[in-house]
């Protein structure tokens, strides 16, 4: 079990967010500091996995579901095209150690990376 994080508190409802999508295994909501016109986060409800490498090894179906939800959100909120970013490790810019996908869309031509 990973240490409790802010996303664990969002999953448990302790920190309220407006959900954009929810499946049995995954939720999505807006990033509080958007880096693009559309900047959503897709996270597993499980608090077991700190990063995408752990999730891919331990629960690849949930990782696939995160990608599916990202695609659905990009279709609902943009033209269906999107950038999917998993910061993995502190030196790569990860600040929350509950695996999450950044879904970015809209006006990306001028932007390179989340957090830069
Ligand atoms: P990381 O840097 O770990 O890849 O991304 C963490 C992201 O979570 C950041 O972009 C940050 O803005 C976002 N974030 C952190 N805390 C909260 C929160 O309480 N609510 C929301 N909606 N986003 C958060």
Image (cartoon, rainbow, N blue to C red):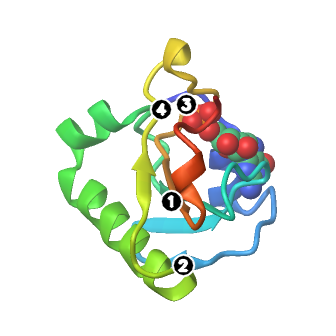
Residue 77, position as x, y percentages in the image: 57, 82
Q: Which mark is residue 21?
A: 2
Instruction: Determine if the C-beta at disc 3 is less than 8 A from ligand 1.
Output: yes
Residue carrying label 1: 42
Q: CA distance from mark 2 to mark 3?
A: 21 Å
Q: CA distance from mark 2 to mark 1?
A: 9 Å
Q: Which mark is residue 111?
A: none
Location of residue 36 by image quarter: bottom right
Residue 49, position as x, y percentages in the image: 40, 37
- First along the sequence among labels 4 and 1: 1
Q: CA distance from mark 4 to mark 2?
A: 21 Å
* Tag 4–tag 1 contact (CB < 8 Å): no
Dot 1: within a 10 Å radius of its alpha carbon, few (fewer than 14), some, or many (20 or more) residues? many
Residue carrying label 3: 97
Instruction: Determine if the C-beta at disc 4 is less than 8 A from ligand 1.
Output: yes
Q: Which mark is residue 87?
A: 4
Q: Residue furthest bottom?
A: 76
């Amino acid at each position: 079990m990973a240490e409790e994080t802010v996303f664990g508190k969002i999953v448990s409802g302790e920190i309220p967010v407006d959900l954009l999508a929810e499946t049995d295994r995954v939720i999505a909501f807006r990033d509080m500091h958007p880096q693009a016109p559309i900047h959503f986060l897709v996270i597993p409800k499980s608090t077991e996995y700190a990063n995408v490498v752990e999730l891919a090894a331990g629960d690849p179906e949930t990782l696939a579901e995160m990608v599916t939800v990202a695609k659905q959100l990009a279709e609902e909120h943009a033209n269906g095209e999107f950038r999917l970013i998993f910061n993995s490790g502190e030196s790569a810019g990860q600040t929350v150690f509950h695996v999450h996908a950044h879904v970015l869309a809209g006006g990306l031509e001028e932007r390179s990376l989340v957090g830069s």
